[in-house]
Image (cartoon, grey):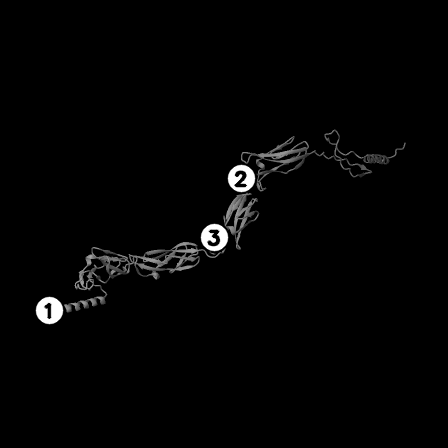
Amino acid sequence: MLRRGRNRRVLGLAASLTVALLMVGLAAGTTVADPTNLTATAVNHITIAPASQTITAGDTSLAYTAEGYDALNHDLGNKTDETTFNIDNGSCNPTTKTCTSTLAGNRTVTGTVNGSISASATLTVVADEGVSSIAISPKTATIPAGGSQAYTATSLDQYGNSIGDVTDYTSFSIVGGSCAGAVCTSTVAAAHAVTGTYLGRTDTATLTVTAGALASIAISPKTATIPAGGSQAYTATSLDQYGNSIGDVTADTSFSIAGGSCTGAVCTSTVAAVHAVTGTYLGRTDTAVLTVGIGGVPVLVISPNPATIGAGDTQAFTAKLYDGFGNFVADETGSMVFTIDGAGTCNGNVCGSNVAGTYTVTGTYSATPNAVAAGADPSAPIIGTATLIVTAAPATPTVQPTIVIGGATGTPRAATPPPTNTGDGSSGGAPMPLFALLLCSAFGVLGMLAVQAQRPTIRH
């Protein structure tokens, strides 16, 4: 009876202890698979050590260890060999159980056992004190022409970790612009390289400068040459105050030319000269020079045309070359061969005839460089003509003798040219009027009487 009672008390104490342990386990948030098993051995959770440590970027941490615990928080011993370690932004050695990172900051090291049970520790990585490089910021920026951009500079270790701000000690420069301290500017619309230099370390950034508001335009080409009657196409570009291109405005620009005409952006002229081409867009203008040369089929002009001379006289002619639009090319008189038809003759550029009539003077020459430049066919001669009118030769004037009447000298009669042969059998010249003959006879009789009256009387 005594033994049976003692056994009942032992069983009661055991049940009470089991219930108590169960309550403690539930309160601790653990799960006990078998409430009657007081020595659970399955790993329920782990801890890794050291929980925190600090290394310099690129160095290796101390080795990590893992300790396992069951659901009852019983220490199940070292589980390091069964644990896999990983780190964010770094790497861990599975053999030595060490980790490393080159990225400054707090890194998390995670140990995992049985594929799902894990714990973590903190690995603080600090930058190397030695400056390896610098970084300027911003790496890219955009400003309008004439604007400015401020920059900062940071010193970095060999792994790119920030050591500190070194803006005040960094020298900044820009291609195609200028920097005052850490502030850079440019008036040239383009992508520019900004360079920062600190203790021999450099870094670059890109500064994009865009064009500003419309200030002027530019037409192109600024100079061009065309033959007379040819044409030249132009373009127009809008510009900001610094001359940066804003865009093509050809289609919206009005073009004009002095001494010619423009259709849209295409201008022409037939006048061989230097012309001003003007483009106008939103009140802004620009000019270009268009040189118009000779062009078209050349024309040879013989001068004078017509010319009139007397029979036996001569006329000197000139030969001038003009292009197809009447622009003077050159005086080609010395290059010509002059000929005349009929009874006429030419000596060089001087032609004439002893026979009255109408003649054609012809000037001929092979195309000279001037003519070819004007558009002539180098294999074909160039010909020009003029009309020469030869009139009958005038008679040589004769002088009438002076008639003295009564001791006085009379007024001489105007000389009458002798008759000329007109070629038709008749004598040329005007016949003496009958009145004139009678007058002459009367003067003769009066003269004789006057002489007779002056003679002395002879008396016998």
For marks 2 and 1, give the one nearer the viewer. 1
Q: Residue 334 in the image: x percent, y percent?
A: 58, 36
Residue 384 sits in quarter: top right
Task: Work out how far the residue at label 2 is from the one at label 1, CA to CA, in angstroms.
Answer: 144 Å
Q: Nearer the viewer, residue 435 or 267?
A: 267
Q: Which residue appears farthest toward the front when viewing the image? A: 1
Quarter occupied by the C terminus:
top right
Q: Is 254 located above or below residue 306 in the figure?
A: below
**Residue linked to disc 3:** 247
**Which residue type does callout 1 highlight?**
Arg
Q: Nearer the viewer, residue 32 or 88?
A: 32
Q: Which mark is residue 302?
A: none
Q: Are marks 2 and 3 in contact (CB under 8 Å)?
A: no
**Residue linked to disc 2:** 373
For marks 2 and 3, give the one nearer the viewer. 3
Q: Nearer the viewer, residue 212 or 197?
A: 212
Task: Work out how far the residue at label 2 is from the one at label 3, CA to CA, in angstroms.
Answer: 39 Å
SS for tag 2? Answer: helix
For marks 3 and 1, give the one nearer the viewer. 1
SS for tag 3? Answer: strand
Q: Which mark is residue 4?
A: 1
Residue pictured at 12% horizontal, 68% vertical: 7
Q: Residue 273 in the image: x percent, y percent?
A: 55, 45
Quarter occupied by the N terminus:
bottom left
Task: Work out how far the residue at label 3 is from the one at label 1, CA to CA, in angstroms.
Answer: 111 Å
Is 362 left, or right, of 144 in this rendering? Answer: right
